[in-house]
Amino acid sequence: MKTENFNELIASIEEAGKIHRNELKASEVHEFPEPDVKTIRKNIGFTQSKFALFIGVNVRTLQNWEQGHRHPTCFARVLLRLVEADPISVFKNLHIKYDNTLIEGQSR
């Protein structure tokens, strides 16, 4: 690694430490809003158990999200946004066997 690149990396790590200790404000913050999990699930016509299977979480986890007891992680929020925008594409990419009848009211 070139000395210039190494020094830039060290400076970046030091800056991250200052941000973490609230000594410095981050220049950019990216946040994903809390998804309305229940609405997303109902919009594609899935039961809780079917939707939990679809996105790869435990049914109890899904129930906790829907009831506001727990909140989806950042990665789950991204997945939920993708499901909300285009459930068929998500299903096709997450599952080997694709059957259009599994997503009621949606077409290819």
Image: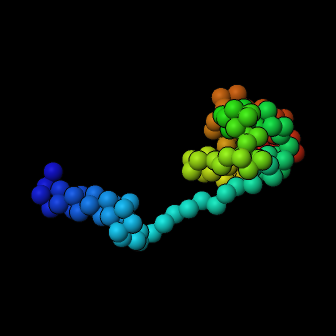
Q: Confirm whether residue 100 shows in the render.
A: no
Residue 6 picture location, percent across and down: 17, 56
Q: Is residue 38 left or right of residue 20?
A: right
Question: Residue sitting at 74 percent across and 33 percent down?
Answer: 59
Q: Is residue 94 left or right of residue 5?
A: right
Work out which quarter of the rendered image holds the C terminus and state it.
top right
Compared with 99, 68 (above or below) is below
How is the rendered protein coloured?
Answer: rainbow
Task: Work out which residue is located at the far left of the displayed protein and give it.
Answer: 3
Along the line of sight, the residue nearer the viewer: 79 or 107: 79
Q: Is residue 4 left or right of residue 68?
A: left
Q: Is residue 74 left or right of residue 17?
A: right
Question: Residue sitting at 64 percent across and 47 percent down?
Answer: 72
Along the line of sight, the residue nearer the viewer: 16 or 23: 23
Task: Work out which residue is located at the far top of the displayed protein and give it.
Answer: 97
Task: Give the number of marks.
Answer: 0
Residue 99 picture location, percent across and down: 78, 32
Compared with 24, 9 (above or below) is above
Q: Confirm whether residue 43 shows in the render.
A: yes
Residue 96 picture location, percent across and down: 65, 28
Residue 49 picture location, percent across and down: 79, 32
Along the line of sight, the residue nearer the viewer: 3 or 14: 14
Question: Residue sitting at 17 percent across and 60 percent down?
Answer: 7
Question: Residue sitting at 78 percent across and 47 percent down?
Answer: 67
